Amino acid sequence: MCIIFFKFDPRPASKNAFRLILAANRDEFYNRPTKAADFWVSNSKILSGLDLEEGKEGGSWLGINKRGKLAALTNYLEGRPNPDAQGRGFLVSNFLTDQSQDSYSYLKRVSSERHLYNGFNLLTAEFKAKEDTMCYYGNRGNTEPIHLNPAGIYGLSNSLLETPWRKLQHGKRLFTSVVNQPLTCDSLVQDLLNVLNNEELRFEGEVENRVFSEATLLTRPRRARVKGTAAPCCGSCPPCVFDPRIMAQGQSPPSP
């Protein structure tokens, strides 16, 4: 399943510390066409992976632009998604291309259209010289977006933000132990990849098992278990660790 860990620290104590550190895993079908993370051909100021599936081309799940805007998405696990719903990946792409709305205003507008989409969680952020902002909205939770507290460490999977699934809690502990120590950029990237490589972050646990209880989900094709990578990535993308100042490619292949 998809998972995101991030530390939002707009005014870090150390001059060389990062204002955002984000490590994420995208779990997707092997046969879903996807473009690896790169600057867009149509807009060289935006960096993200891109969905190439028919009807959803141009959507994304994690991206950033040179104006300091970032967006990240996970799906909310549901038994029978609506096949006619709008593509959730456009929620990321539209925010990165938008030049008029801030993080909260954008999510406020999205919340008014929540019925058009299957379940999702959406993070939006803006990093500016004088102020950093990060917001969250899930269309299966509260009707209003929220501002995230500065200097916070968060975990998000395929339920609402900070839902205490066992794998999320375990991964958050590992992530916290990494980001709360002084590390070079290269060491940080490698340690975060090791966190996401941890076997205990795979699909397991009482809560997750109940979510997957419906028989319809048991007939799915084999899924890509993207092991030890950080988003934006999927079964067809190279792994990477992503924050406003780092983009480091790894070489770990997906694990079936």
Image (tube, rainbow, N blue to C red):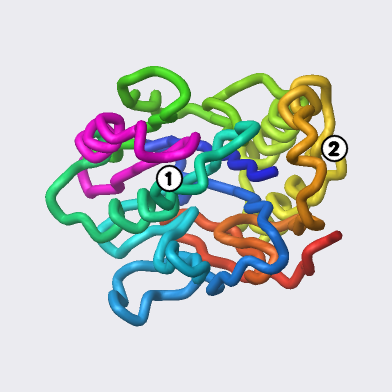
Q: Is residue 162 left or right of residue 12?
A: right
The one nearer the camera, 171 or 72, is 72
Image: 173 above or below 26: above
Q: Is residue 224 left or right of residue 10?
A: right
Image: 248 above or below 108: below
Query: Where is mark 2, residue-wise?
Result: 200
Secondary element at tag 1: loop
Query: Can residue 186 be seen here?
Result: yes
Q: Is residue 70 in the magenta section?
A: no
- Comparing marks 2 and 1, which lies closer to the viewer? 1
Q: Earlier in the sequence, mark 2 or mark 1?
A: 1
Image: 194 above or below 208: below
Residue 35 in picture, x, y percent from top left:
53, 74
Residue at the left extreme of this rendering: 100
Q: Is residue 153 left or right of residue 88?
A: right
Q: Is residue 116 in the magenta section?
A: yes
Res 107 → quadrant: top left
Image quarter hosting the N terminus: top right
Residue type at mark 1 is: Ala
Image quarter hosting the C terminus: bottom right
Which residue is painted at 29% across and 71% down in the image?
45
Which residue is painted at 84% across and 61% down in the image?
255
Give the magenta part as a residue range: 105-130
Residue type at mark 2 is: Glu
Secondary element at tag 2: helix
Res 145 → quadrant: top left
Which residue is painted at 29% across and 37% down in the image?
110
CA gap between label 2 and label 1 equals 33 Å
Query: Where is mark 1, residue-wise?
Result: 85
Residue 103 in picture, x, y percent from top left:
26, 40
